């Protein structure tokens, strides 16, 4: 049964980023959430049938980590009492449940390093497949094409770049794993990292550039002393080139459209702080940002926002969690992240590169979460909870 769960998890990780349906009212997000929620439910049932639920208490998690997740879920549930729209709140809880359920499925079915490698390979392969689909959609790689052309199976260039950006650090450090990864797979991961990076550039998301820059700075500091002098020089030059290119991309302006988009975010954040000020403890209710935010829209935001555009997300996950579940919810979410940071069990021996790659991928996502939705996007949310699970496991080599 455990092997079935492991294979099912790999299949789910590969399929969620790629699935979309023109038969639903929402082509991209709805079918992804449905597959993720249903798939996690099936895998959880299979684990329970094997009486694997008790393994949650037997595994090497710290109690602080278990309590952090439980507290975040509890506060999210309690905040539902304040929700104006209970339906939206319940839908949000389903999404949170899918993420937490995925975490526990991964935590209780992945017991060996080989199994973790299979999950990472599935994530990278799905990213590569999404890029191939984008090539098919655009009929090639066209540097002058609009960023909106590169949406692949995500329907949004930001969500597309966000997902493949987490696969880049994983690919880089799997390519460096001489002892654990076979040579042909190391070549694949190296090529995949460069291939994915091309599409991150084409999607032109400044939040992704910032996230990857932070991830590579962390990775550079973590592994610098592991390389000979000549390799250190090459790594330094590569980092400088990447950071310089990212800085130019972030600082450059492409006209009024970009300026307005940045202004819109600032005004949305301003309105979100207003929501937080009026609902400091439990927020406005999980899933109810889009219901309550129209009451806090400023005149400036209305002026710069194009007609027919409505904000359903705060474009900052930390602010959105704060506004929906209050200060208690934000504290619990930060508690989860802090518990992961305290664990860091993989940064030893043959697992050192894996640990750095997981941490770098998490940093890339969390930096982007300051500018764009993360936990509220199915593929990125899936990646976040998987990285949490992989980062806290003590795996048998």
Image: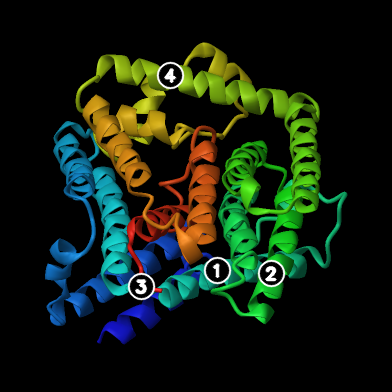
Quadrant location of residue 113?
bottom left
Direction from residue 223 to residue 380 in the image, left or right: left
The Cα–Cα distance between marks 3 and 2, rounded to whole angstroms, is: 36 Å
Q: Earlier in the sequence, mark 3 or mark 2?
A: 2
Direction from residue 190 to residue 286 in the image, left or right: left
Residue contact at pointers 2 and 4, CB within 8 angstroms: no
Please indicate, yes or no, whether residue 252 appears anywhere in the rendered image: yes
Q: Earlier in the sequence, mark 2 or mark 1?
A: 1
Task: Read off the residue under disc 4.
Answer: 271
Residue 370, x across and y down, in percent:
50, 32
Task: Read off the residue under disc 3.
Answer: 396
Q: Work out whether residue 68 or residue 29 is closer to the camera in this orientation and state it.
A: 68
Q: Earlier in the sequence, mark 2 or mark 4?
A: 2
Q: Earlier in the sequence, mark 3 or mark 1?
A: 1
Quadrant location of residue 186?
bottom right
Task: Read off the residue under disc 1.
Answer: 18
The Cα–Cα distance between marks 4 and 3, rounded to whole angstroms, is: 48 Å
Q: Examine the rendered structure and indicate whether residue 4 appears above or below residue 243.
A: below
The Cα–Cα distance between marks 2 and 4, rounded to whole angstroms, is: 38 Å
What residue is at 64 percent from the left and 77 percent from the top? 185
Residue contact at pointers 2 and 1, CB within 8 angstroms: yes
Dot 3 lies on which element?
loop
Residue 100, x across and y down, in percent:
28, 56
What residue is at 23 percent from the left and 56 percent from the top? 61
């Amino acid at each position: 049964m455990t092997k079935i769960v492991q294979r099912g998890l790999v299949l789910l990780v590969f399929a969620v980023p790629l699935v979309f349906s023109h038969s639903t009212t929402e082509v991209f997000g709805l079918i992804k959430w449905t597959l993720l929620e249903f798939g996690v439910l099936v895998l959880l049932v299979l684990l329970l049938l094997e009486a694997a639920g008790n393994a949650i208490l037997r595994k090497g998690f710290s109690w602080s980590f278990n309590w952090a997740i439980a507290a975040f879920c509890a506060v999210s549930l309690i905040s539902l009492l304040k929700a104006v729209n209970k339906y939206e709140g319940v839908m949000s809880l389903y999404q949170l449940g899918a993420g937490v359920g995925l975490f526990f499925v991964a935590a209780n079915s992945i017991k060996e390093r080989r199994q973790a490698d299979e999950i990472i390979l599935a994530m990278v392969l799905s990213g590569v497949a999404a890029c191939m689909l984008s090539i098919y959609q655009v009929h090639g790689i066209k540097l002058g094409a609009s960023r909106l052309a590169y949406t692949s199976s995500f329907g949004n260039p930001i969500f597309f770049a966000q997902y493949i950006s987490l696969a880049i650090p994983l690919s880089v450090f799997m390519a460096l794993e001489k002892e654990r990864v076979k040579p042909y797979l190391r070549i694949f991961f190296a090529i995949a990292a460069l291939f994915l990076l091309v599409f991150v550039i084409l999607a032109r998301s400044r939040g992704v550039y910032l996230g990857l820059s932070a991830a590579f700075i962390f990775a550079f500091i973590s592994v610098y002393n592991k390389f000979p002098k000549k390799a250190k020089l090459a790594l330094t030059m590569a980092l400088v080139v990447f950071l310089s290119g990212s800085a130019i991309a972030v600082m450059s302006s492409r006209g009024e459209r970009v300026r307005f988009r940045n202004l819109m975010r600032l005004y949305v954040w301003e309105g979100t702080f207003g929501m937080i000020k009026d609902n400091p403890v439990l927020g406005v209710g999980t899933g109810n940002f889009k219901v309550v935010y129209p009451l806090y829209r400023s005149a400036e935001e209305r002026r710069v926002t194009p007609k027919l555009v409505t904000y359903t997300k705060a474009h900052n996950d930390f602010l959105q969690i704060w506004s929906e579940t209050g200060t208690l919810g934000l504290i619990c979410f930060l508690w989860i992240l802090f518990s992961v940071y305290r664990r860091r069990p993989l940064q030893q021996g043959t697992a050192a590169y894996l640990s750095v790659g997981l941490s770098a991928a998490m940093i890339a996502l969390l930096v982007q979460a300051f500018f764009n939705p993360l936990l509220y996007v199915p593929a990125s949310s899936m990646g976040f909870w998987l990285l949490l699970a992989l980062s806290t496991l003590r795996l048998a080599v």
